[in-house]
Image (cartoon, grey):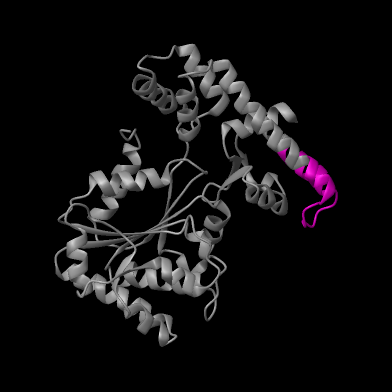
């Protein structure tokens, strides 16, 4: 399907890429707000193939329990008897995108046998320098970086990685680095990390605002349903699911064979049932949070959202909002210092149930 909107974010990211690397960029936002789709649109349709080489490392679908797991995902091994730069030239003929860092067969085994992570980073640096000498700008993108947040290798691996990224961007100006995450607690931790002060910037990819959401509905209905929805239908959809792209797509797609009221009521009932079950389970095995009457505190925190979609994080005790974020009920914007439900659908469930 044709990509929709996000021109503001695209313009900002392209502007960053056109200048020399200076910062680590963290792209964050609620679940399913379109972060990966945005980056894919930029890589596949907005970059000049002759000017850029993009290394995309997706940690989303993999279980990572140790350092070797991460390294295995970081690299992609090739059996061809070619030097790394020759491998890259063959891979970027039609697109600047490469999944993982290319490495000749057995080379990674040799690097790891020395049992020093610096060898791995040296390999990547030398490869990036070779790309730069060829007149191309390297870009490294890590999707769902929080997956390695607790891994240790001579201390936490994430700090080793941050130090390396600072070297690539702020010191050597060698490669752009973009880190994507929907884990707002991870972004809050990163935002408050002293070592990244003045070395990192943050780009929010949020759900669509109302005006954009209604235009998105027009865009989808013409392509999927071959018709235009009425103003009342669009307003009704927005009142249930807000500007969450994936939920709007789900509603429009189901309109091929279901009535709108049935679709929306079914989605809300499902969300209410999930929230109700969550609250019931709290009565049986209370979370380990150091606040008296945990269940009451959590219900009290959720009731704050009955009349407001967004609240200051200081209005809810930290252990409570951390728990609700981990359960994907709330989203924290650490830069604004605000909390809100993960979606309008969750918000409606809170209002109906409490």
Residue 330 or residue 271, whichever sits in front:
271
Residue drawn at x 38%, y 25% is 220
Rendering quarter of residue 26: bottom left
**How far across and down, in percent of the image, does residue 327 sit?**
65, 48
- Left or right: residue 314 versus residue 125 is right
Residue drawn at x 47%, y 35% is 246
Residue drawn at x 34%, y 33% is 4
Q: Which residues lie in the magenta part?
A: 280-302
Rendering quarter of residue 296: top right
- Left or right: residue 90 versus residue 335 is left
**How far across and down, in percent of the image, does residue 157 sit?**
50, 73
Residue 120 visible in the picture:
yes
Tell me which secondary structure the magenta stretch mostly adopts: helix
Q: Is residue 184 above or below residue 352?
A: below
Quadrant assignment for the N terminus: top left
- Left or right: residue 150 versus residue 163 is right
Residue 308 visible in the picture:
no
**How far across and down, in percent of the image, does residue 48 sit?**
18, 51
């Amino acid at each position: 399907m044709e990509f929709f909107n996000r021109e503001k974010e695209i313009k900002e990211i392209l502007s960053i890429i056109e200048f020399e690397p200076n910062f680590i960029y963290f792209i964050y936002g609620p679940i399913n707000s379109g972060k990966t789709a945005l980056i894919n649109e930029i890589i596949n349709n907005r970059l000049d193939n002759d000017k850029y080489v993009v290394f995309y490392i997706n940690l989303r679908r993999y279980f990572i329990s140790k350092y070797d797991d991460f390294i295995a995902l970081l690299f992609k091994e090739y059996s061809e008897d070619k030097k790394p730069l020759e491998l890259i030239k063959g891979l970027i003929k039609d697109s600047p995108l490469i999944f993982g860092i290319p490495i000749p067969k057995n080379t990674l085994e040799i690097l790891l046998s020395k049992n020093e992570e610096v060898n791995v980073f040296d390999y990547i640096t030398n490869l990036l320098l070779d790309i730069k000498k060829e007149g191309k700008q390297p870009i490294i993108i890590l999707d769902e970086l929080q997956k390695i947040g607790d891994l240790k290798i001579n201390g936490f691996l994430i700090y080793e990685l941050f130090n390396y990224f600072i070297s690539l961007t702020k010191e050597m100006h060698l490669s752009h680095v973009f880190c994507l995450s929907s884990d707002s607690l991870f972004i809050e931790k990163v935002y408050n990390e002293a070592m990244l002060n003045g070395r990192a910037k943050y780009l929010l990819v949020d759900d669509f605002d109302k005006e954009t959401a209604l235009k998105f509905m027009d865009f989808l209905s013409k392509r999927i349903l071959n018709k235009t929805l009425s103003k009342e239908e669009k307003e009704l959809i927005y009142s249930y699911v807000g500007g969450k792209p994936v939920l709007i797509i789900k509603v429009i797609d189901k309109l091929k064979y279901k009535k709108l009221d049935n679709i929306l009521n079914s989605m809300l009932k499902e969300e209410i049932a999930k929230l109700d079950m969550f609250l019931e389970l709290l009565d049986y095995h209370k979370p380990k949070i150091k606040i008296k009457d945990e269940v009451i505190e959590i219900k009290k925190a959720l009731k704050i959202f009955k009349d407001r979609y967004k609240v200051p994080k200081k209005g809810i005790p930290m252990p409570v909002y951390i728990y609700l974020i981990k359960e994907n009920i709330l989203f924290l914007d650490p830069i604004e210092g605000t909390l809100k439900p993960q979606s309008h659908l969750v918000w409606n469930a809170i209002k109906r149930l409490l």
